[in-house]
């Protein structure tokens, strides 16, 4: 079973950038699709970005398209989320998630807080 640990969150001004990382241990990371989700205060968790097991396919929520970039390094068992042009609406706890082959996202990290100050 893959275990996920996020890092890279913090406080950033409006218009700034952050890079989140997710380190995976155990399991077969290179066979899992990976994603980033977020939960803002008082809101439901929402999808942010997806990357296929080999990195060939990515997708993004409309709210982050053109500003966020997801990537992975299967040799290092990591997935990253580069976030640019941040706005207060991006403030949330960001979660890394893994989806085993032919299954939904069912493995979650503990989350990392991102706060964008206005």
Image: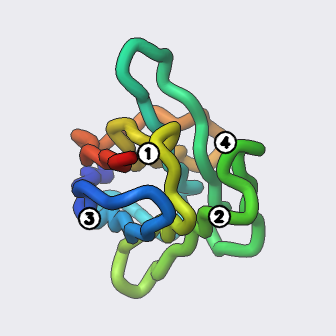
State if disc 2 and disc 3 touch (CB < 8 Å): no
The residue at the point 41 percent across, 63 percent down is: 28
Q: CA distance from mark 3 to mark 1?
A: 16 Å
Question: Pointer 2: what residue?
Answer: 67
Residue 69, x across and y down, in percent: 61, 68
Question: Pointer 1: what residue?
Answer: 97
Residue at the limit of the structure toward the top, as seen here: 42
The residue at the point 53 percent across, 45 percent down is: 99
Residue 62, x across and y down, in percent: 77, 44
Q: CA distance from mark 3 to mark 2?
A: 17 Å
How many neighbours does mark 2 have within 10 angstroms: few (below 14), some (14-19), or many (20 or more)?
some
Residue 111, x across and y down, in percent: 27, 42
State if disc 2 and disc 4 touch (CB < 8 Å): no
Q: Residue 26's quadrant in the figure?
A: bottom left
Q: CA distance from mark 1 to mark 2?
A: 20 Å
The kind of secondary structure element at disc 2 is loop
């Amino acid at each position: 079973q893959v275990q996920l640990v996020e890092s890279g969150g913090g406080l950033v001004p409006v218009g700034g950038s952050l890079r989140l990382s997710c380190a995976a241990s155990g399991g077969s990371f290179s066979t899992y699709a990976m994603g980033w989700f977020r939960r803002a205060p008082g809101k439901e968790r929402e999808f942010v970005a997806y990357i296929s097991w080999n990195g060939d396919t990515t997708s993004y929520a409309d709210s982050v398209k053109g500003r966020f970039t997801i990537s992975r390094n299967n040799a290092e068992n990591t997935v990253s989320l580069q976030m640019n042009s941040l706005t207060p609406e991006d403030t949330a706890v960001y979660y890394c998630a893994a989806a085993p082959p032919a299954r939904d996202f069912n493995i979650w990290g503990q989350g990392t807080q991102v706060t964008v100050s206005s």
